[in-house]
Image (cartoon, grey):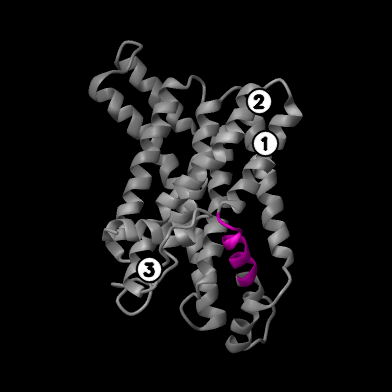
Amino acid sequence: MPRFLQVISAALSFGTRFRGPLKPSEPALYSRALAFQPLAGLLVGVIAAVPTLFISVNFRALQGLILFASGIYLFLLEWLTRFDNLHAFDAACRMLAGTGVSPEERLGRAGQPGSTPCTAVLIGLKLLVLYLIFTRTALLGDGMMLALTLVTVPFFGRVAMLFSYPAGNGRERPEVREPVRLFWLLVAMALLAFVLGMIRIYGGSFYSFRSMKLTMSGFHSQGGGGVSGVSLLVAIISLGIQDAVAFLAGGFLSVLYWNTEASKKLRSTPPPEFAGAVCETAELATMIVFLILADDVIF
């Protein structure tokens, strides 16, 4: 099997339920597989979004069923990753709980059975935010924004997860190179800014920031009521870039929190469980930003 396919297979073997024929058996292959985790997240988002969008489009008149779809999406999101990130979040919370505990004892808690209240709170918050998103998108017929939300939530979670791994060349242990992080950061920001800008322009009344409304009205006044050519591209970028920064800020805060806590309480680099915790909290942060956009909140 070509090396590239080995890397993709390894990425799927621990990133999703779709196990590949090969598992990462060496640090170099493992590190290369980590670089493709955002693609694995995008795959999870697309698969989880399909049945949810089908219910939303075909049963719009049944409000209860559409809102129930938010729970279906959350279940698929966790099931497609074998609940690995959720278990990692639970283990990370268990390690950080309590005061006056030695780092060695905290690390020993990772494999303990049971779950912490933090996991129930996380699931409850995700369900609540998704419920509110569905009330502001699916019930109002805004399928474009709902589709973007469902597809990109796990994608942004895994982009943030890349920053929770140590930086290096991955020759001795699983690591993520800095150029890989920068690449996915730029790709995520550029694509989201473009898509959100297109939705702003062609989606009618969907806006989030007051400055964006003023920007859009300015482009209309300069173009005689229309936007075209270079002005169209500038409008798309200007309308989407602020939202893209907001998404990245949510992921950055998630990484900052878990890395800081690991350094303070464990006195070491974050263990592997913290990568899953970063992914889970970054997904929640992404959902909250989407809710802000859908609710026309002025910062």
Q: Secondary structure at mark 1?
A: helix
- Given residues 197 and 170, the one toward you in this image is 170
> Rounded to the nearest whole Å, what is the CA distance between mark 3 and mark 2?
43 Å
Sequence-wise, the earlier of marks 2 and 1 is 1
> Rounded to the nearest whole Å, what is the CA distance between mark 3 and mark 1?
35 Å
Question: Is residue 243 shown left or right of residue 296?
Answer: left
Sequence-wise, the earlier of marks 3 and 1 is 3
Query: Residue 22's x, y, as percent?
Result: 40, 63
Q: Main secondary structure of the magenta part?
A: helix
Q: Secondary structure at mark 2?
A: loop
| Residue 89 covered by magenta stretch | yes
Q: Is residue 176 above or below residue 65?
A: below
Identify which amino acid the numbered label 1 is placed on. Ala
Q: Residue at the location (40% across, 33% down)?
A: 195
Of all residues, the one furthest to the left in this rendering is: 230
Q: Secondary structure at mark 3?
A: helix
Query: Residue 275's x, y, as percent?
Result: 50, 66
> What residue is disc 1 on?
69
Tell us which disc is closer to us: 3 or 2: 3
Q: Is residue 47 above or below residue 4?
A: above
Q: Is residue 147 above or below residue 280?
A: above
Q: Residue at the location (71% across, 57% down)?
A: 121
Residue 30's mark?
A: 3
> What residue is disc 2 on?
139
Q: Residue at the location (26% across, 58% down)?
A: 2
Question: Is residue 115 shown left or right of residue 262?
Answer: right
Sequence-wise, the earlier of marks 3 and 2 is 3
Tell us which disc is closer to us: 3 or 1: 3
Identify which amino acid the numbered label 2 is placed on. Leu
- Given residues 109 and 202, the one toward you in this image is 109
